[in-house]
Amino acid sequence: MEKINYWDNSKYQYCAYAERLLNELISLNEKVKQPIDMYEVKKGIYYAKKYHGSQMRQSGEPYYSHPIEVAYMLAQYTALELPQYFRTDMIVTALLHDTIEDTTLTEKMIAYIFGSQVASQVQDLTRVKPHGKISSAEMVEMLYKEKKHDVLLVKLFDRLHNIRTVSAKSPEKAKKIIEETLRYFIVLAEYLGLPSVSKLIHTYTTINILTDIDLNATNFSYQDNYQPLSLIYQNALHQNYNL
């Protein structure tokens, strides 16, 4: 295992993305019964920035801005709407959700630094599995079957941020993300009892279809009468999934 240096607050380095998250958490902590551990969040930010390093998003922003924004949106929503999921391990998982897949940080290293719960949740959000790489849609179905509600929440907000910034991607990649979002993520949010999240995802998806992306290049057409999931999957979600 790669040597991991001891971490303390003195290693935290300012950045606008992180400060926005930390300030929001300080505010939210005053409104909840079980506040977030700011020390652990700062540590999560540090390792997200350390291991994503110089990676960049197609928008030109540093890649670590993405997991920090996912953590920000997740914190806002859970604190106000689902306080049982306003947890330190959830915020740290959001911060690290792409590290196993996209960096040299491993599940074993995360367990050593943050504990087994965070490590397991980050591993669940990793699309590289022993049998090969799976799609985001396949991941959603897998997490649903395993009833991992908390991890699904992180994945939903990961997709919300990705759809907000999808215009920076190529038309082909944007088309794939939008189609997958319409078929799986919107209906999943509805069946999880998160209509406001579903509405947000739908709004950003529609905005991108209508204004931000030239999808004509890929012959993409938006239809309201799409079949988002198989009927078997829809019925299972409706009958068995209780958040």
Image: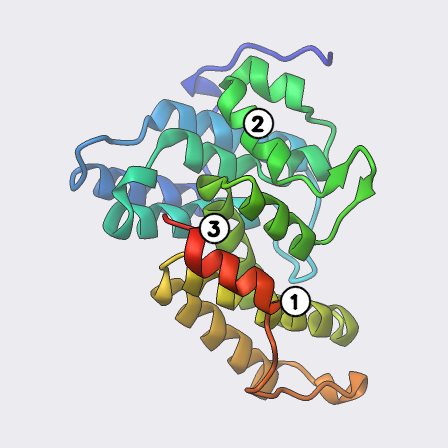
Q: Amino acid at mark 2?
A: Ser
Tell me where residue 106 sits by quadrant: top right
Question: Between 81 and 71, which is closer to the camera in this rendering?
Answer: 81
Tell me where residue 53 sits by quadrant: top right
Whether residue 64 is visible, yes or no, is no
Q: In the figure, is residue 222 to the left or right of 239?
A: right
Q: Nearer the viewer, mark 3 or mark 1?
A: 1
**Count of marks overlaid on the render:** 3
Alpha carbons under labels 3 and 1: distance apart: 21 Å
Vertical order, 160 against 214 (above or below): above
Alpha carbons under labels 2 and 3: distance apart: 21 Å
Question: Between 208 and 226, which is closer to the camera in this rendering?
Answer: 226
Q: Which residue is mark 3?
A: 69
Q: Amino acid at mark 3?
A: Glu
Q: Amino acid at mark 1?
A: Glu
Q: Secondary structure at mark 2?
A: helix
Q: Earlier in the sequence, mark 2 or mark 3?
A: 3
Q: Secondary structure at mark 1?
A: helix
> Do residues under tags 3 and 1 come within 8 Å of each other at their CB atoms?
no
Q: Where residue 131 appears, x then y in whole percent?
A: 83, 37
Alpha carbons under labels 2 and 1: distance apart: 25 Å
Label at residue 120: 2
Q: Which residue is mark 1?
A: 180
- Pointer 3: residues within 10 angstroms few (<14), some, or many (20+)? many
Q: Nearer the viewer, mark 2 or mark 3?
A: 2
Q: Earlier in the sequence, mark 2 or mark 1?
A: 2
Q: Where residue 38 appears, x then y in whole percent?
A: 34, 28
Q: Where residue 192 appears, x then y in whole percent?
A: 41, 56
Q: Secondary structure at mark 3?
A: helix
